[in-house]
Image: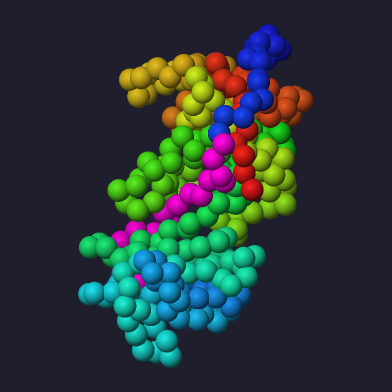
Amino acid sequence: MRYFLNVFVMFLFCLVFSTPAFAIKIGLIEGAQQTIVAVSNLGGIYDAESGKEILKLQPMSAYVLKNARNSIQIKINGKYYSLHSKRIILKTYDAKGFVLAKKRWYRQNMIIAKNSEGLTVINDINLELYLLGVVPSEMPSSWNIEAHKAQAIAARSYAIANMGKRASRGFDLKDTPEDQAYGGASAETQKTNKAVLDTKGQVLVNNNKVISAYYHASAGGKTTNSGKVWCKNLPYLHSVPSFDNNVPKSGHGIGMSQHGANNLAKYGYNAYQILAYFYTNVQLATIPSK
């Protein structure tokens, strides 16, 4: 094993972006005829176009939103009332509050948009806060912290590289493994939050572009060249022994094996050595963030 791990790409720290902190829109629900929402603290519903507050929301009270013919309706005291809007934003007055959807708590804002198929529910959130809900959803919180850090950097890179991937549906990425599993604030743990904070703003780049740092659960012994799956060879995704023979293959086998990353961390390798092993011809860059 040492033979493979002694050959590393040298990581360079550099500033490649001067843009403000990224915000990202995550699709949680599509085509719903009704959905239940709530706020943890006093909050409100706002018209997304005008920014005008439509209704105050009481904390820890469930509200049913319904897809109606010409607008979104809300159920109050057993009766439905029109919000006279097809696109609304839910948020708390306190920035530290949470919004509920899909039976989970989420940070920052929730967008509910009406279209021909029903209601789309979207979490509009800062990228770093989004990652707090990705890492524990993609990787068990009991795993090694260095594996968590590698996961955070890979997930951040994937999110930035795929920003706008699902723009035609009103958001950037889904909250499922089709993009990245995301459980919101309800999924967060102290340990995985630390991994995100310790790697704040760090991404992998190739040829001055943030890469789609693909990853999977287990390659079953050896990762796969991207060209064998997508008919396109990417310069940073090559087949390497995956150090995950202890578990069956699960996923597309391209990029970082999550089980392999955890096994390498157990052997004493840090997040950057793990990433350098699974992704070739890459550098580590830092994006300015709040």
Vertical side of 94 occupied by 289: above or below:
above
Q: Visible in this render: residue 185?
A: yes
Number of marks present in the image shown: 0
Q: Residue at x 36, y 89 (%)?
A: 79
Vertical side of 62 occupied by 19: above or below:
above
The answer to which of 265 and 167 lies nearer the viewer is 167
Q: Position of residue 24 (x, y in %)?
A: 48, 49
Which secondary structure dominates the residues rendered in magenta?
strand
Where does the N terminus fall, quadrant-wise?
top right
Colouring mode (rainbow / by chain / secondary structure / one colour): rainbow
Q: Position of residue 63 (x, y in %)?
A: 45, 78
The answer to which of 97 and 176 lies nearer the viewer is 97
- Quarter of the rendering containing residue 120: bottom left
| Residue 181 is covered by the magenta coloring | no
Q: Visible in this render: residue 218?
A: no
| Residue 29 is covered by the magenta coloring | yes
Q: Position of residue 144 (x, y in %)?
A: 72, 37
Looking at this view, name the residue that lies furthest to the right. Answer: 268
Q: Residue at x 43, y 58 (%)?
A: 122
Q: Residue at x 33, y 20 (%)?
A: 231
- Quarter of the rendering containing residue 286: top right
231 horizontally vs 106: left or right: left
9 horizontally vs 265: left or right: left
Q: Position of residue 230 (x, y in %)?
A: 35, 24
Q: Residue at x 45, y 76 (%)?
A: 53
Task: Find the magenta span and give its range.
Answer: 18-35
64 horizontally vs 23: left or right: left
